Image: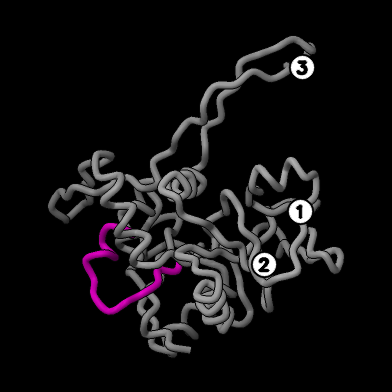
Amino acid sequence: MNASRILVASPVDGSPETASVSLGYSSGIRALERANANVLPYSLCFSDDLARARSRCASIALERPGWDWLLWWDDDVVCKDVSIVQRMVDAAGRHGLEMIGAPYPRKRIQASFPYKPLRTQLEAGRIEWRDEVQLVECIGFGFVLTSRSCLSLMTQRWNKEWFTDVREGQPPRETIALFKQIHTDESSVLGPNGLPMRFRDLLSEDYSFCWRWREMGGSIGMYVGEGSPLMHVGAHGYTGQVTNQEGTF
């Protein structure tokens, strides 16, 4: 694996000195570092809020030379074999993708996965795949690769959404809010009483990033090949699996 072309960003909960991360994450990061991957220091990434922290990571990453892919890896997501990173890079190349993520279950006993199918998939009433990659509308950012080109193009496209990022001990800097949360368009749905009610969703910071990328015409791949799905660590180690040969989670 040519890990030297991988840069890793991990927002953590708390300060760099006191933040706790899952053992599986820590072991995986060390394995990537031994393979010559580079990791953005936690001091850049701690999650005062995720939209700010992730936007900061993207901005500072683009100032660093020598990498092709930024791996967004949350500290509670575990992959037992980091060679999945290379398989995801290879799959992205075969499918012409600038963004690809591996699924992991939400922290619930009934397994469900943080991704949003394409509208055409929802209209078909069934999500199937027989390949290693499924195109999706949005995906959770627990384990996602974005190319340098993806982040560079998005920074240019959304340059009016800047904010002054202020960190203790650092000079203020203008940063593009690629992960700023957005509202969906207003629509009408049936409420609990059966009467119409207006509805507008507030997307999470990672889904907001996905929305911006797709708004530019970009595609998002969900990797469902070897090593996927990953584990999500909370009160339990939450896992999931493909339930049939067609690949429906």
Give the Cα distance between marks 2 and 3: 35 Å
| SS under mark 3 | loop
Q: Which mark is residue 77?
A: none
- Residue in the foreground of this view, choosing between 215 and 138: 215
**Magenta stretch in the rendered image:** 58-71
* Residue 73 spot, x, y in % from top left: 49, 66
Q: Residue furthest right?
A: 244
Give the residue at mark 2. Answer: 231
Q: Extreme left residue here?
A: 171
Disc 2 marks which amino acid? Answer: Met
Check disc 3 and report the residue beneath it.
Answer: 192
Mark 1 vs mark 2: which is more N-terminal?
A: 1
Density class for disc 1 (Cα within 10 Å; few <14, some 14-19, many ≥20) is some
Q: Quadrant of the C terminus?
A: bottom right
- Magenta stretch encompasses residue 60: yes
Mark in the foreground, 1 or 3: 1
Q: Secondary structure at mark 1?
A: loop
The residue wearing badge 1 is 127
Seen from the viewer's position, the closer of residues 224 and 98 is 98
Q: Amino acid at mark 1?
A: Ile
Q: Is residue 60 left or right of residue 210?
A: left
Q: Nearer the N terminus, badge 2 or badge 3?
A: 3
